[in-house]
Image: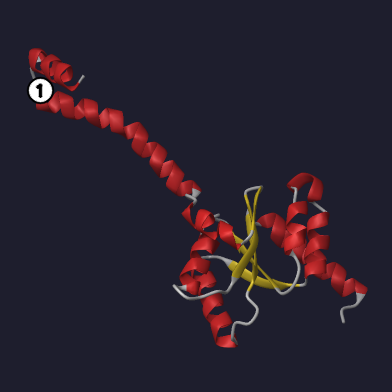
Amino acid sequence: MLKKSEKTQVINELREKINASPNLYITDASSLTVAKINELRALCFKAGVEMKVVKNTLAIKAMEQDQDEKGYAPLYDALKGPTTILFSEIGNVPAKIIKEFRGPKGERPILKAAYIDSDIFIGDDQLELLASLKSKEELIGDVISLLQSPAKNVISALKSGGSTIAGIVKTLQERG
C-alpha cells in the first residue's frame, strides 16, 4: 500500500510522462508470460516506445490535472482492469509493435484506447487504422514528392525536346 506522499509522487511523475508524450496507447497485456512481456518490452525499447504498467486510479488522477487543456476524459473508461501504457513520439509506432507482436494468432496486448496528438481512438478495432496512419516524417516526405513532381515533369520535357525553342514548345504541346 502506498502512502499518500508516495501516491502524490507517482501521480506527478506519471503526469509529467503523459504530458511529455504526444501519443499514448492504453493496453491490456495481462495473461502474457514474463518471457512474452520481456519480448514486448524489447520491441518497444528498440522502437523508442516506453512501456509502463500503471494503476488506473493514479493514471486518471494524473490525467485529470490537465483535462481542460488535453481532453483526456474519454480515456477514463479504458482505464479499467490491468493497464499498460505505451508512450511514443511517433503516433503509429505502438500500433505497429502491437500488430507485429501479436502475429497471426496473438490476442494480446489488447488496445483499449489511444491518444494521438489530441485525437482519441477507443477499442481494439482501431488498431488497423492506427497502424496505417502516416507519421509526420512520412507526410512531409509525401508533400515534398508532390512538390518536386511538377518540376521534374518540366525538366524532363525540356530535356526531351532538345535544346531548340521549337522542340521545347512541341514537347510541351504533346504533353498538354
Q: Is residue 125 left or right of residue 172?
A: right
Judging depth in this view, the residue of 146 and 133 nearest the camera is 133
Which residue: 77% across, 72% down? 55
Q: Is residue 47 left or right of residue 5?
A: left
Instruction: Look at the image and tell me in which quarter the C terminus lies.
Output: top left
Which residue: 63% across, 75% down? 29
Q: Position of residue 174 (x, y in %)?
A: 14, 20
Near mark 1 (Cα within 10 A), the count class, few <14, some 14-19 or many ≥20, is some
Q: Position of residue 129 (x, y in %)?
A: 52, 54
At numbered mark 1, what does the secondary structure look like: helix, strand or loop? loop
Q: Position of residue 1 (x, y in %)?
A: 87, 82
Q: Is residue 111 above or below residue 69?
A: below
Judging depth in this view, the residue of 5 and 96 nearest the camera is 96
**Residue 14 image-quadrant placement:** bottom right
Q: Is residue 173 left or right of residue 97?
A: left
Residue highlighted by disc 1: 161
Q: Is residue 149 above or below residue 176?
A: below
